[in-house]
Image (tube, rainbow, N blue to C red):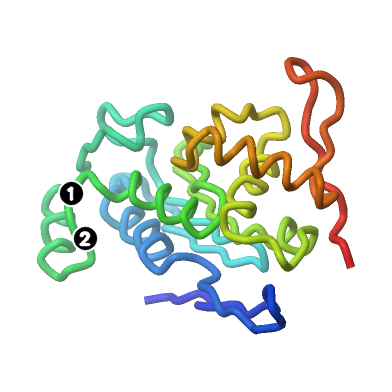
Amino acid sequence: MLEPKSKSTRLAKGGLFQTTPEYPEFVWNEIIVNAVAHRDYSIKGTDIQIKMFDNRIVVESPGSLPGLVRLNNIRTVHFSRNPKIAALLKEYKYVKEFGEGVDRMCNEMVELGLSEPEFSTVAFMTKVVINNNKDLNDTLNEDLNLTERKIASEIYNDNKITAENISNNTKLAISTVKRNLVGLQNKGILLRVGSKKTGYWEIKNKIH
């Protein structure tokens, strides 16, 4: 199976090099397996498309979301368009447990300080994008810890996000989020523009 660049190495705090996966293995494997398991095989003239870029992987599969699955419930609702194919993939260990994939993908991406997978439907195609946050990582200070990177990643994707929503998305305690928001501002990484209610966050350039 196609395998993206598996790891990236950066200089971390203390002058030591730290190696981390570019994407969680489960995630890039799952979006490809899902494309095979859930594509609409009645649609002819196009195939599953896997596109790899410096900062993202894009997988497009013929067919809209299956059954009762919608963009707003995709983490909790499971429906198999092709149950025999899904069963075969599970037998050969490509699928671990039915229904857990999308939620686990989101959790693993956030745990690594990356954005959650982006799902969309365009015409008759379902599209999934996973980002390695290369643009964000090129901007951030190398000395940020994982908690700070998780918070910065949330702000990178939504600069009007609240501390409460960051807490919900990352499973970090609200007190931890608020403390790190202050810390990121003190480091010069974050700037709050406007009021608490109507303002937004701005991520500043990397400190050298």
Residue beneath disc 2: 95
Image height check: is 169 above or below 26? above
Secondary structure of residue under mark 2: loop
Structural crowding at the residue carrying mark 2, measured as other residues with C-alpha within 10 Å and reported as few (<14), some (14–19) or many (≥20): many
Residue that appears at 53% across and 74% down: 20
User: What type is the residue that disc 1 sits on?
Assistant: Phe
For residue 1, which quarter of the picture? bottom left
Residue that appears at 67% across and 68% down: 54
Farthest residue to the bottom: give it: 16
Q: Position of residue 88 (x, y in %)?
A: 12, 62
For residue 19, which quarter of the picture? bottom right
Secondary structure of residue under mark 1: loop
Structural crowding at the residue carrying mark 1, measured as other residues with C-alpha within 10 Å and reported as few (<14), some (14–19) or many (≥20): few
Alpha carbons under labels 1 and 2: distance apart: 7 Å
**Is 5 displayed left or right of 141 in the figure?**
left
**Is 48 displayed left or right of 22 in the figure?**
left
Residues under numbered marks 1 and 2 in contact, where contact means CB atoms less than 8 Å apart: yes
Q: Position of residue 116 (x, y in %)?
A: 50, 47
